[in-house]
Amino acid sequence: MRHMSTPRANGRIIRLVVALVIGVAATSISAYWPLYMVERGGGARITTVYRGLYGWWNARDSVIGLHWSNLQLLENPLNAPVFEGELAPWEEPPPPPYPQAQFLRIGTLSAGWPRPVIAMRWTVTSRTRNFPVPAELDDADTSIVYAAESALTGSRGGGPDEFHLLWQGIAIDVVFFGAIVVGPIALLRRLARPVTPPATSAAAQ
């Protein structure tokens, strides 16, 4: 039994390693490829969100593998704290204090499929930079394209100011892609394995 179990255990380890390597490679490709392929967005939708004493215009757009979120701080703080509007963790604005409230814009682009695995952020505190555009005006389908171009080439005033790895998304995507490839292979190997007939007992002979 020990001699039979050792090859099986080794086979499982090999399959796990292969699944991990394939999952990591596919996850990396799924984050890069949408940046390279995007031609236009779906059209941003503008809403308002509130975090404590501060409100934000929020423009959001998405295509397969990319999600764009543009926040613009409203000029006047609220009198009482309010928490309203849903944002993904990678979209959330930093905590206050905020410099030059009327100018603060935060654009964040996440990449990866089926879950985002990296988030890239641009922070603008003056009117001299035109990307990201003010969120209250960001209702077209171009910002997500410009963000992808900036992430790849550093165009439109420079590349992202921050990069954040989204570890939960990375783990999910690695498992997803690894299972897609290795799972069917393991199933086919199991189905192709010859069935050993039960041994005939001495009494039956």
Image: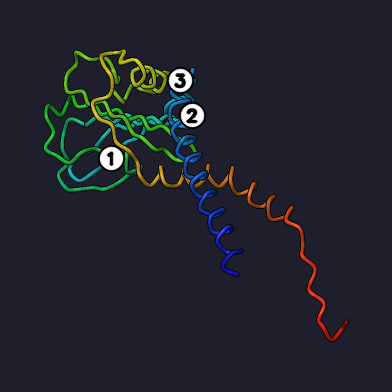
Query: What label does residue 63 carry, if any?
Result: 2
Which element is circle 3 on?
A: helix
Question: Which residue is nearer to you in this view: 116 or 9?
Answer: 9
Query: What label does residue 45 carry, if any?
Result: none
Residues under labels 3 and 1: Cα distance?
25 Å
Residues under labels 1 and 2: Cα distance?
20 Å
Rendering coords of residue 118 (x, y %): 36, 35
Q: Amino acid at mark 3?
A: Tyr
Rendering quarter of residue 49: top left
Which element is circle 1 on?
A: loop
Rendering quarter of residue 66: top left
Q: Amino acid at mark 2?
A: Val
Looking at the image, tell me whether mark 3 or mark 1 is earlier in sequence order. Answer: 3
Which residue is disc 1 drawn over? 92
Question: Which residue is nearer to you in this view: 163 or 63?
Answer: 163
- Residues at circles 2 and 3 in contact by the CB criterion of under 8 Å: no
**Farthest residue, direction bottom:** 203
Looking at the image, tell me whether mark 1 or mark 2 is earlier in sequence order. Answer: 2
Q: Is residue 163 above or below residue 7?
A: above
Which residue is disc 3 drawn over? 36
Q: Nearer the viewer, mark 3 or mark 1?
A: 3
Instruction: Quadrant for the N terminus, please.
Output: bottom right
